[in-house]
Amino acid sequence: MSVTIDALTEADTAGTTAPPAGPRRFRVFRYKRGDERPHYETFEVPVGHRTTVFEALRWIQVHRDRTLALRHSCLHASCGTCGVRVNGKEALACVTMVHDVGREITVEPIANVPVLTDLVVDMREVFERFPDDHPIVRGSEFLDDADTPDGIASYERYEDCIECGLCVSACPVVVTAERYVGPAALAWGERVLEEPRGAEVANLLSWANAPDGVWRCHAIFECTAACPSGVNPAARIMSLRGTLLGRRLRKQPRGSDPT
Amino acid sequence: MSDAIDERRSRGPVQRKGLGPRPVAWLDPRGRTLGHLAFVGNRITGLGLVFYLYLHLAVLSLLLRGGEAWNDFLELATTTVFLLLDVLLLFGLLYHGLNGLRVTLVGTGYVPNRQKALWWVGAVIGTLALALSAFRILGES
Amino acid sequence: MTSAPGTPPFHVLIVGGGGTGGALAHDLTLRGVQVTLVERGEFTSGTTGRHHGLLHSGARYAVGDAESAIECIEENTILRQICPGSFEENDGLFVAITDEDMEYYDDFVKACADCGIPAQELTREQALALEPNLNPSLKAAVRVPDATMDAMRMPLRFFATARRNGADLRNYVEVLDLVVNDRVVSGAVVRDHVTGKVGEISADVVVNATGPWSEKVAAMAGVDVPIRPSPGVMLALRGRLCNMVVNRMHRSGDGDIVVPQRALSIVGTSSWTVDDPEELDVPEDHVQRMYEEGAKLIPAVTRAEFRSAWSAARPLIGSRGDADAGRELSRTFKTYDHAETDGVEGFVTITGGKATTLRGMAELCADVVCHKLGVEAECRTRETVLAPHTEVYAA
């Protein structure tokens, strides 16, 4: 059975040992603890037709500078560890083709999170914002007409959010409002509301209802644009707001203060 | 042992997006999408309208100084430059008002997934309204 | 570190922060051993994080390698208990497409039964009702307790628990060399990529848990382990084409599995060998083969949007010619106590294995290490429910 796939009609191979489509200049952010300030280093990297930013950075690490620190794991946009900014824009390095970026490529760590080393950030600030109840599995809405096997009530799948922090990096509000819970955490809260799976919904609502919760968002939607996983954090924040408003409006005639 | 862990986690520099010091970094439009540019527009027109409001009150206070002061002002107010500024003011009002409607609809969870479409609808309405009004305002000068 | 060498509490330095290293750190910490783990990149950034995410039922090995199959089904069951909420527990299907596949069917079902792997025979119609995207020309299917794991987040729970219990887990610390004097390994020379500085970490035992890099690290101690890095290609497609894991019912071949994972479908895999696992190719013809073979299971594969294609290197244990002197615990993984095999003290290598058997590998390696140190403590990892993966970053 012969299959022609449009994306594969090129004869060259993927990866950095491919016949180069021409070298690209990479300007890479560098920082080690103790440095007075970060600096940028430039490398000429041979790239092929399907080389990803990760592969190019890896080439630099292997062939030019072993001390370049990179963060990566799954290489297929599922673990969320390889988040960087490529020419200022948030992206996952493992699924960003160099070809799509341009001739000169600047790679920097994601914003709004302290840098640990080079392109690696300390993800603690991203994770500390999430509510304690942090389930990673949800019901699968794919193929929902299908039967399930005996003993399995419904199919499960992992949540879309891969905890990459690109939304936190893209959000202009996080820059000035340091205590803002942020898009990733709020989107997660809304997911729990949508599908509680036994979680404490009341706690979640009061956590989201704070001035630094959903109300700090300015409906800018950079987070939704940056998300590589289709989480749509901005819409989820708005939806949370709607829910909170609805509850408030319904409770007001009774004179009780909903918190 | 926990010292080692804390030491590993101590903070490095924090990268911020946008040119300029933190409070105004949001002005930098590079690499930003429509939602952000709309927000920037809202802030600038908002500031502009506040400034205008102050100006307006100052102008109205001329009434306290009697008819002549007011008439002097009216002469200024009918010059072309001033009328152009009026058009600019109208742009600010229309932008801030229409975008404000958009933000309200989106921000209360009514139409959270239509923010781009709403912006363009507002842009069309606003442009038409501005064009018609500008024509009338400047036409009479 | 804090005690004189050779006295309790003993200090073990684990080199390699993949699933094996993490599970070993967890096991040893529970046994009262002081653990430092060093990983040159992010945890699971070697081979562990890159696989397609199959929580093995063992059915793939039932016919050819019963011992591994039994290992898998046992660990499969244990992992679901100690890592609740970390899997897409949808089971899996082995699907027979051709007559040749059907010749394998009876052996397959019998072998699963022999190995204690629950296997439910299904008709073509039943299979299609469960998975409408299956190749309609399928002949029969067998349901087995496969599941999907998150290749990074599940192992990370071992790290999180170990850290919670006091293990010193250091990512971005790279071993440059081992400290060896008179055939005794007493530590490692490391570069900390956070500071850029070089230093030394001393230990009573150093464990080499570096997967396909095992040979490289072992060479630093002047010993040889027969590990050949064996990469394979995987293809991630957007869209969840199935909810259950879908396997081809035949003896192992390329592209014979489709693993659903969040909103993606992962088609795998292929196999070749390299000398150096540092930079792996992603051969275009292998990717093409994933499309072709995957489409035999689920035709919609060819229409699905491309997300990523990448390679990961299995640590393949080659034969050493005569006398596999390492303590052979299973045919899929081995622990080498180099004092026994090579006369080098203070150094142990654990290698081979599958993502599913990480806890089992760690248990047996911890047994070896504790035996060396004279630590008498039972393994408690079968019953210990693990901390959430987020605790690796924020306790």
Image (spheres, coloured by chain):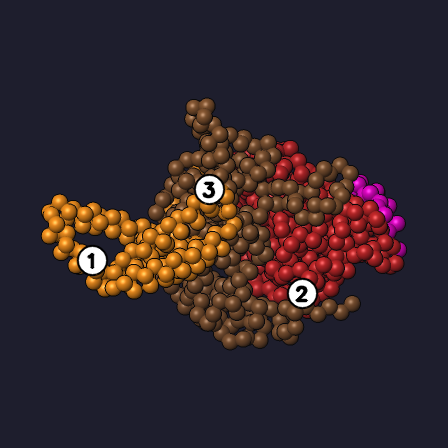
Q: Which chain is brown?
A: A
Magenta span: helix, strand or loop, mainly? helix
Q: Position of residue C176 (x, y in %)?
A: 49, 57
Look at the image and say whether residue C122 sits in the magenta stretch: yes
- Front: mark 3 or 1: 1
Please state which amino acid type lies under the numbered disc 1: Ala
Q: Residue sitting at 58 percent across and 42 percent down?
A: A136
Q: Which residue is mark 3?
A: B108
Q: Secondary structure at mark 3?
A: loop
Q: Are marks 2 and 3 on the same chain?
A: no
Segment tinted magenta in the rendering:
C103-123
Q: Badge 1: few (under 14), some or many (20 or more) residues near its Cα, within 10 Å?
A: some
Foreground residue among C29 and C392: C392
Q: A98 above or below C34?
A: below
Q: Position of residue B117 (x, y in %)?
A: 49, 55
Q: Position of residue A100 (x, y in %)?
A: 52, 67
Q: Which residue is mark 1?
A: B77
Give the mark nearer the N terminus: 3 vs 1. 1
Disc 1 is attached to a residue of which chain? B
Say which quadrant the C terminus of chain A sits in.
top left
Marks 2/3: CA–CA distance: 46 Å
Q: Which chain is orange?
A: B
- Front: mark 2 or 3: 3
Q: Which residue is mark 2?
A: C287
Q: Secondary structure at mark 1?
A: helix
Say which quadrant the N terminus of chain A sits in.
bottom right
Foreground residue among A97 and A13: A97
Q: Which chain is red?
A: C
